[in-house]
Amino acid sequence: AFATYALLAYGRRARAALILAVAVATARAVSGAHWAADLAGGGMAGAALGVLAYRAALRIAPRGHLSRLRAYRRPGPPAVAEPPSA
């Protein structure tokens, strides 16, 4: 859930969270602590909870930190060059 939320909120800067989550899941599968299906189900549930938390944060604080991050990442309208004045 944290990795999904971080990726939605901070984009590429949060790749480390995703890499860590995948590494932990892989280590648990290799060590035999969990079945692959358990890890896949947990990953899907975590992703869904991360998306829900992100959307709830945007709904609760529409002008908060996350909305400013989204506006910063979202490309603006193309700049129109003004003709030179004589």
Image (spheres, rainbow, N blue to C red):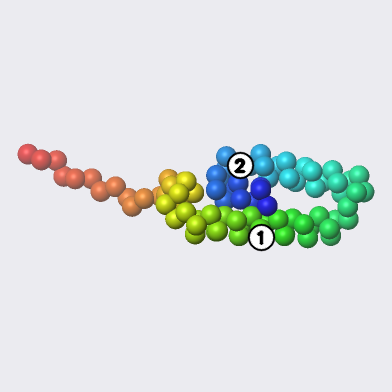
Residue in view at x 55 percent, y 58 percent = 56
Residue in view at x 49 percent, y 59 percent = 59
Left or right: where 36 falls relative to 81: right
Left or right: where 79 falls relative to 72: left
Decide if residue 74 is in sight here.
no
On residue 75, which mark appears?
Answer: none
Residue in view at x 91 percent, y 44 percent = 31
Give percent across and percent down for residue 54.
57, 55
Query: In which quadrant of the rendered image does the C terminus lie?
Result: top left
The residue under label 2 is 14
Amino acid type for the residue under numbered disc 2: Ala
Q: Quick one: label 1, few (<14), some, or many (20+) residues within 10 Å?
A: some
Give percent across and percent down for residue 47.
67, 56
Q: Nearer the viewer, mark 2 or mark 1?
A: 1
Q: Quick one: label 2, few (<14), some, or many (20+) residues within 10 Å?
A: some
* Residue 13 higher or lower than 59, as above or below: above
Give percent across and percent down for residue 76.
36, 50
- Mark 2 touching mark 1, by CB under 8 A? no
The Cα–Cα distance between marks 2 and 1, rounded to whole angstroms, is 17 Å
The total number of labels drawn is 2
Residue in view at x 84 percent, y 43 percent = 27
Q: Is mark 1 on a helix, strand or loop?
A: helix
Decide if residue 59 is in sight here.
yes
Q: Which residue lies furthest to the front in this view?
A: 60
- Which callout, 2 or 1, points at the residue further toward the start of the chain? 2
Amino acid type for the residue under numbered disc 1: Ala
Q: Is mark 2 on a helix, strand or loop?
A: helix
Left or right: where 32 falls relative to 84: right
Give percent across and percent down for residue 72.
43, 45
The residue under label 1 is 48
Q: Residue furthest right?
A: 32
